[in-house]
Image: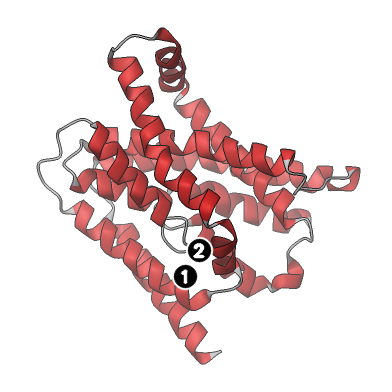
Amino acid sequence: MSYIEAIILGLIQGLTEFLPVSSSGHLELMKAILGDKSLPEESLTFTVVLHFATALSTMVIFRKEIFEIIKGLFQFKWNEESQFSLKIIVSMIPAALIGFLFEEKLESFFGGQILLVGFMLIVTGLLLLFADKAKNTEKSVGFWDSLVIGVSQAIAMLPGISRSGATISTAVLLGIDRTKAARFSFLMVVPLIFGKVAKDILGGEISYDGSQFGVLSIGFVAAFVSGLFACTWMISLVKRSKLSYFALYCAVVGAIAIGYALMK
């Protein structure tokens, strides 16, 4: 893998992890454009590094909130911090169960399934459009809301369904304040990313040698910096009800992907 490819893929991961356009869908589309052979044999290692970078960018943006979550877990008091921590845990359950029980089945959807990606991008676009028009979004996240949003996160494990788009849209449609919805969406994925990274490392599923250091480093930096930008920008966009632009983008890219898959 060249440094240019590492930068491109890092930027795509960093931007699309937070912007509601599906990072997995875009990486699958890039895979089709570049060709499988253009991606590194150590693609899993590279993917883990990119996800780790975006998780760290989330931690930088929400460092205060993450400290409160950790503090809430160890206070053993039924206060606002502990309740928020438990809501994060509840939101993780559906995705954790689906990932554990159907890991091999999910991986089968990531083998150049461009037609599936296209349809799922259109579904993402519709979700964003509905959320952008939602009214009466003033309440905070409740425990039931956490579970429903968690189900959306589990569904977003399919390529083409945007995780941030699905979770934020679901939260807004449940009547949750837009800023709180974005905040909860970004925080709920951090433990899952670190859990997946730990699983891959401890399971011996990733490989590394010194020759990869430069490519991995530049990909990490690109994903981290673009993640910082995209996370901050996304919070502002959700607050100002600007999701319809991304809905149109997803619909157009989805239609192109479907056309490409059918003509191939």
Which residue shows up at 33% across the image and 23% down it?
A: 84
When the figure is inspected, residue 169 is found, relative to residue 65, above or below; the finding is below
* In-front residue for pair 29/218: 29
Q: Residue beneath label 2, please? A: 25
Give the quadrant of the C terminus. Answer: bottom right
Task: Please name the residue that numbered disc 1 is placed on.
Answer: 117
In the depicted structure, whether residue 83 falls above or below residue 112: above
Tag 1 near tag 2, CB within 8 Å: yes
**Coloring applied to the structure:** secondary structure
Q: Residue furthest bottom?
A: 263
Q: Nearer the viewer, residue 102 or 79?
A: 102
Quadrant assignment, res 36: bottom right
Instruction: Give neighbour class at mark 2: few <14, some 14-19, many 20+ (Cα, 10 Å).
Output: many
Horizontal and vertical percent position of residue 137 = 15, 39
**What residue is drawn where x is 20% and y is 58%?**
130
Residue 143, x across and y down, in percent? 26, 32
CA separation in Å, label 1 and label 2: 6 Å
